[in-house]
Image (cartoon, rainbow, N blue to C red):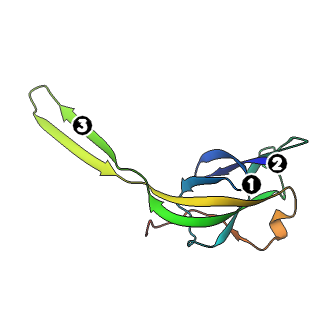
Amino acid sequence: MFAVLKTGGKQYKVAKDDIFLVEKLAAEAGETVQFNEVLMLGGETVTVGAPVIEGAAVQAEVLEQLRGPKVINFVKRRRKHSSQRTKGHRQYLTRVRITDILASGGDTSGVKTAGGSAHASN
């Protein structure tokens, strides 16, 4: 069974025991979080939401909070102005492992909902 979920403005196709990186979540390592925006469930029968499937959820364990690779933006203006600017950025990420895919009953499971953090404190 697989699911397509939405978090951090991106969509991910996941199955049980998949490990992947998402935008930073407000959860500590070792906690269990739940993604409630499930767009599609697949397996023997395929269920497509409009836009989401009510009651469906994907539960995941937070493995670690980390930062991505450094992205360097270099801007140079040439004509008559010899100015240049370099800016660097490292995105805050969360590594998660999918533990369970629920076709129904996700709204009554009592697991913390996965949400982004307002401040990127690592």
Q: Label 2 neighbourhood size at 10 Å, few (<14), some (14-19), many (20+)?
A: few
Q: Amino acid at mark 3?
A: Val
- Residue designated by label 3: 75
Spot occupied by residue 66 in the image (x, y as percentages of width and height): 46, 62
Q: Label 3 neighbourhood size at 10 Å, few (<14), some (14-19), many (20+)?
A: few
Q: Residue at x 60, y 46 (%)?
A: 10
Q: Nearer the observer, disc 3 or disc 2?
A: 2
Q: Label 1 neighbourhood size at 10 Å, few (<14), some (14-19), many (20+)?
A: some
Q: Residue at x 24, y 37 (%)?
A: 75
In the image, is residue 95 above or below residue 85? below
- Residue designated by label 1: 16
Q: Does residue 92 appear left or right of residue 23 in this picture? A: left
- The residue most toward the front is 17
- Residue designated by label 2: 1
- Quick one: quadrant of the C terminus? bottom left
Asked which secondary structure carries label 3, the reply is strand
In the image, is residue 45 above or below residue 63? above
Whole-number angstrom distance, CA of label 1 to CA of label 3:
43 Å
Q: Is residue 117 visible?
A: no
| Quarter of image, res 120 | bottom left
Q: Residue at x 59, y 52 (%)?
A: 20
Q: Does residue 90 appear left or right of residue 95 in this picture? A: left
